[in-house]
Amino acid sequence: ALCETLRATSLPDTAEDGLDALQTVLEELGQSFSETDVRTVIDTLAVLSGGDDGDAVDRSSRQWSAVSSSAFQNLKLIHDDFLESDSNSESTRDAIIDCCLAFGKARHDINTSLTATGMLWSLADRDPSRSTVDAVLSRLAELTRDGRAEVRNCSVNTLFSCVVGLGGRFVDEQWCVCLRDTMFGILDRITRAINDGGTDSDARSNAAAAGDDRYKVNVHHSRNSATKQWAATQVLVLKGLERVLR
């Protein structure tokens, strides 16, 4: 019932109060939750991230910023408990991965997005199975299309660190997909964004956010154009490829 209320409410204050109650329940009774209960909670937190999830309630405005922050604190609690547990639940793992992606893409707070990106790496490091690593790399690749240079660059660096750190476990087919589709796919998209004047489809969809003070980024005068920022990301990708292929 609490999760249903959180999903349905259009009032930020109500959502904040509900998330405070949810955190208390997780801290006191979270260990007794069924896998279905945990999945429901995680899916609810993803909805409250403030990303563009097509939900009927628009949570991208400034009024929902505190809600997103509170929801992320709940996610971190679940994420940390999952890392410390012996659970091998693929359902819970997949839900956490998708929720990290939602907060990575959300634009309420840049630090939240960067932390969510790092949490993806933690999940792959905990469980370096092919299914987990492939899922994490897929979400990191999606974040490399972000219109914010910090999130994009963090995702690039995290992705290549993940591959370098865990690549010794890859089978030939996994290497083929990783190189052809993931790494060179990222490089191709970034090159196209540069050729298009520094705009990729995700960056264009976020154009409305550019006028909001929350989303302004202080950059050196020599990198104050979108094209130069995408070019800097391209350099990171090429350096990452060098690390992998060396």
Image (cartoon, helix red, strand yellow):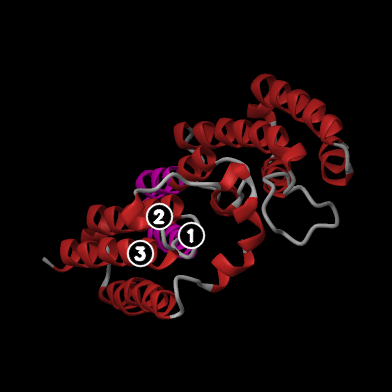
Q: Nearer the viewer, mark 3 or mark 2?
A: 3
x and y percentages locating residue 31 in the rendered image: 63, 28
Q: Is residue 224 above or below residue 121?
A: below
- Which residue extends farthest left? 246
x and y percentages locating residue 182 in the rendered image: 37, 72
**Residue at (53, 31) in percent of width and height:** 81
Majority secondary structure in the magenta region: helix
Kind of residue indicated by mark 2:
Ser
**Residue at (43, 57) in percent of width and height:** 152
As rendered, which of 201 and 210 lies closer to the eye?
A: 210
**Residue at (40, 56) in percent of width and height:** 224
Q: Is residue 12 above or below residue 201?
A: above
User: Viewed as shown, does residue 180 lie left or right of 148?
Assistant: left
Alpha carbon separation for disc pair 2 and 1: 6 Å
As rendered, which of 228 and 76 lies closer to the eye?
A: 228
As rendered, which of 227 and 121 lies closer to the eye?
A: 227
* Badge 2 element: helix
Alpha carbon separation for disc pair 1 and 3: 19 Å
Circle 1 sits on which residue? 143
* Badge 3 element: helix
Of labels 3 and 2, earlier in sequence is: 2
**Number of numbered discs on residues:** 3
Near mark 2 (Cα within 10 A), the count class, few <14, some 14-19 or many ≥20, is many
Of labels 1 and 3, earlier in sequence is: 1
Task: Answer whether labels 3 and 2 touch (C-beta < 8 Å).
Answer: no
User: Viewed as shown, does residue 209 lie left or right of 133?
Assistant: right
Q: State the image quarter where residue 232 is shown.
A: bottom left
Circle 3 sits on which residue? 228
Label for residue 155? 2
Is residue 131 covered in magenta?
A: yes
**Residue at (51, 72) in percent of width and height:** 200
